[in-house]
Amino acid sequence: MLKNTLVLSFILAPMLFGFATDKDNGKHTLRVGINAFPTTLNPIYATDETSQAVVNKMHGFLFYFDGRGEIQEGLLKDYRLVNGERTILLELRPGSRFSSGKELEAADVAATLNLLKDSRFEYPYRANIAFITEIKALDRYRLRLEMASPNAVWRNYLTFPVLDSQEIAGLAPEKFRAVIPSGLGPYRVKRLQEPERVILELHRYNALPGMYREIEYLVVSNTQLTPLKLVTREIDICELQPENVEAYRDIPAWQEAFNILKYQKFGYTYLVFNLRNSRIDLNLRRYFYNLLINGHFLEKFLRGRGEKVDSPFLLLNSDIAPAQLAVAPLQEEVKIKLATNAESRLRKELVLFLRDELKPFHISIEPVFLEYHSFLKNLREANFDAAVSGFVLDIDYDMKEIFYRDAYFNYAHLVNPRMEELLDQGLKEMNPQKRRAIYRQAHQTWLEEISLLPLFNLYYFMGVSRTIPLPRETSRLVGSLTDFLFNIQDWRI
């Protein structure tokens, strides 16, 4: 399942950001290095990591995931399940305000949900809220949500950004896409300078002591320059490439200029097969499984940069051993066009690595490097043999957005009623042990078809200027549509 695990901005922000002094950068500004300009600042369509990182600071959410991967209340004062765990009662915390100044009310949550469920607006994670069958605002701060059946992780799905009902009323889908809506976070857009920077400013409604007045996102398209920009204090924090992290211990100037913080994202890089392509048959997919999951190619490629993943149901990964699948030998050379996103250096390296390593096994790989939007278009239109991409997931077992037939991220174009049945059972099962057993069955069902191969979960690293004191605790695990900064505690100068 891929969906919003966005962290509640205005609750965590006073813990996240210290107030910069003249000694630090003279502008009371936190400067964050990013590798590309955001594709959108409408939070409903922010699926790329850069867009997510920016809009997270501008919006608030009913629930969010903390740095340990645990779900927490955000905009809510109280919540409970009634009616045989089929009805959700929510009570909002009074006093929360949008950047426009309007106070949050139950009608705003109801209007947001209705928009997200409307197929015309093409919300990428609409399948995640399909379990909500009725939405009713009871009074100013309370609302009721009806579910078709009990849902074990219903809170995970209520992590969408809440919008102002007055702003979205009557907007046609095409006009809504172009909107930068008011949010319940502490920041709003001050200035956009495409393609080089986005500047957010703290606004008075959700501002609290100790917060930066501005957050400036600076595009550093050449990721190898980020350590230099930390050394010269052009930026305060940014993600570092693994090779820069390896070089860090040997360069005193880097060590004097910035610290390195390590974390993981709850997801994996994967190889997906086009099931509509008859040449990519089950025997070939099993052949790939035996080579990549049971072989030692990935350890050789990773060189300590991450961990292998043996199951697409990531929480099962620690206790699932790879199987040796029966295959027929390849009688002749198999030619495969292997596509990936050209902007991802790691994925390009992986494709080239597989091209070289799989030659002795009668697999001839032709690399296809595509611009991001062209890459996604080809995936959705089944115009590929196989592809390397990546998922960042909710911190849970559920993989509906990957394995359901009409799911947004079902790039394999899988149609498997048994898998869908098991995923439905898993969502309805409230007992954790029984639920785990269901997903073990789903793992076995995946093995029977192998629509994709989970490969590895990388380690990620943030470089943080030494002008910013390190927090007592940093994020260890980041879920989908969030970013490292919103899972850091006690950023204080």
Image (cartoon, rainbow, N blue to C red):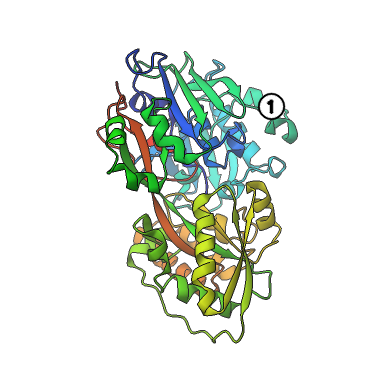
Q: From the viewer's perspective, is residue 190 above or below residue 402?
A: above
Asked which secondary structure carries label 1, the reply is: loop
Mark 1 is surrounded, within 10 Å at the Cα level, by few (under 14), some (14 to 19) or many (20 or more) other residues, namely few
Residue in view at x 68 percent, y 50 percent: 374
Which residue is identified by label 1? 169
Q: Quadrant of residue 69?
A: top left
Q: Note whether residue 77 is visible.
A: no
The x, y position of residue 26, in whole percent, is: 39, 13
Image quadrant holding the C terminus, namely top left
Residue in view at x 42 percent, y 68 percent: 297
The x, y position of residue 12, in whole percent, is: 38, 29
Q: Quadrant of residue 489?
A: top left
Q: Note whether residue 106 is visible.
A: yes
The x, y position of residue 199, in whole percent, is: 52, 22
Q: How many marks?
A: 1
The x, y position of residue 46, in whole percent, is: 58, 38
Residue in view at x 60 percent, y 33 percent: 112
Going by the numbered disc 1, the residue's amino acid type is Ala
Q: Nearer the viewer, residue 240 or 65?
A: 240
Q: From the viewer's perspective, is residue 379 above or below residue 20?
A: below
Q: From the viewer's perspective, is residue 474 above or below residue 84?
A: above
Q: Nearer the viewer, residue 448 or 264?
A: 264
